[in-house]
Every structure is written in C-alpha cells, then in structure tokens.
Image (cartoon, rainbow, N blue to C red):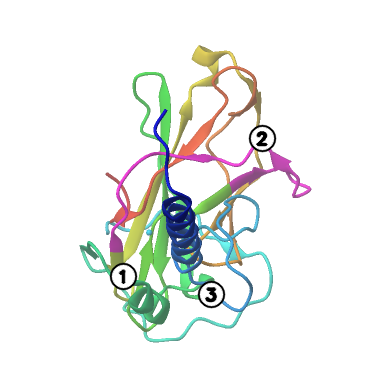
Amino acid sequence: MVYTPRSARRGALFAGSVAVLGLLTACGNGQTVHSSPPMTSSGTAAPATGDSSAPAPSDTATTSSPVPSAPTGAPSTAPTRATATSGGGTTAAASTRCHTSELRASVGRNDPGAGQENFPVVLTNTSGRTCTVRGFPGAAFVNASGGQLGPNPGRESGSSTTVTLKPGQSAWAGLTFSNPGVSGAKTAKPAALLITPPDERDHLKVTWTGGEVPVSGNSSAVFLTVFSPGTAP
C-alpha cells in the first residue's frame, strides 16, 4: 500500500473541486435565450438548443401565441442557397439569432428508405434582416386538442454549424422514424407538428400531412438532426 501525504491529498481534492466548478461554468455559458433562465430540453414549446433553398413547401405555420410582426423587406423570390459556417461564438449567435417571429416553418415531402420515414423540417427567414440558426429544433406531434402524442424526439449525433439565412433563405433539419408497418410500433395520426427554432421559446405550428407516426412500443423513437442550409438533402 502506497502512503499519500495528507498535504498531497488536500491538493488533489482542491484541484478536483476547481475542475468541477469550471465544468459547471462552461455548461452554463453554452446557450442564449430571450429573458428566462437557459433550458436545454426539446419538445412541446420548449427551447431547442444546440445549431437552403428551393422554394419552401406550401404548408405554412402560425405561431402558438401572439408575436411581433416580422420586419418587412423580404425579397419576393428566395435566394438559391444559404451560407453555413462552422464555429461562431456564443456572442455572435446571440446577436444574429433568428427569432420565432422572423421565421416560417414547413414540413417537406417524405423521402422514405430502408424502412425509415424521412421528412425535412424547414425554417425560412421571413424578416428583412440576415439571421442565423444553429443546432437542433425542438419538435412535438400533437392531436387536434393540442395534446402531445408520443415522447419528445431524440437527437441524432452530428456536428452543428451556424447556418446564415439572408431574407428568404431556408434551413432544414431531418425528422426520421421507423416505418410503423415494419417496426410494429403503436401509432397515432397527429393533427400538427410543433417546431421550436434553436434557442427560442415560442414555437410554430405546422399542419401534419405525413400520416401515422409511432408513439409507443418497439422502435417508436423519432429523431431530429441538426440544421443544414437549404430545404432538403
């Protein structure tokens, strides 16, 4: 048995405490929100933290609660591509982040494959300024009464990039789940999909036309990917 002097043990304990304090400080600085304490959960009306441009799908969204009118000046036709940049510090993200009231949400056409259903969740900048999105959206399926169907979607692994959206440009995130006919999961037919932009608290509501979705049982998980430029892969 190797004896460790008491002074060495006290030094190790102090160093460990400093490391833990540093980790807590780093976690607390990783997010920006409007005016409430930071949250990292996704789902119904919760902020989504983290991190294009054929014509957007025709199904538009409405905000769940009154929000300021989006600034005017958006071009009549969307540019062909948005800009994605890696990095981008928290300060830059806070100053240029797209707010819910400046965005329109839509869900693109399903692109099924290998027993998976794959839908692009699209956010389009309807404001007159350039803004950014980064990371994952929050999302939740709801019935006609507004009740949530199934658990909050999970998150696929992937590196976030800051997607810069000029007026009229879009970014998309993937929403994917196993085909219920293959997986045998219990299903429900949602009335709408609630979408929360990254680092925002207000969500957008899009009519769901994608049919049955898994809500419980085997392989019932729904997953989201990080935002990329454009409206589809």
Q: Are marks 1 and 2 in contact (CB under 8 Å)?
A: no
The residue identified by callout 2 is: 150
Q: State how far apart marks 1 and 3 are (Cα).
A: 14 Å
Task: Name the front one of labels 2 and 3.
Answer: 2
Element on which disc 1 rests: strand
Quarter of the N terminus within the rendering: top left
The spot of residue 153 in percent (x, y) is 55, 40
Q: Which residues are magenta?
A: 140-162
- Could you tell me the amino acid type at mark 2? Gly
Element on which disc 3 rests: helix
Of callouts 2 and 3, which one flags the residue occurring earlier in the amino acid sequence? 3
The residue identified by callout 3 is: 101
At 59% from the left edge and 83% from the top edge, which residue is drawn? 68
Q: Is residue 97 above or below residue 84?
A: below
Q: Is residue 140 above or below residue 115?
A: below
The spot of residue 150 in percent (x, y) is 66, 35
- Few, some or many residues within 10 Å of mark 3 (<14, 14–19, 20+): many
The spot of residue 182 in percent (x, y) is 49, 13
Is residue 109 located in the magenta-colored stretch of the structure? no
Of callouts 1 and 2, which one flags the residue occurring earlier in the amino acid sequence? 2
Give the number of marks: 3
Quarter of the C terminus within the rendering: top left
Query: Would you say 74 lies left or right of 28 here?
Result: left
- Could you tell me the amino acid type at mark 3? Ser
Query: Would you say 99 lies left or right of 75 here?
Result: right
- Could you tell me the amino acid type at mark 1? Leu
Q: State how far apart marks 2 and 3 are (Cα).
A: 27 Å
Of callouts 1 and 3, which one flags the residue occurring earlier in the amino acid sequence? 3
Is residue 160 located in the magenta-colored stretch of the structure? yes
The residue identified by callout 1 is: 165
The secondary structure making up most of the magenta span is: loop
Viewer-proximal residue among 51 and 192: 51
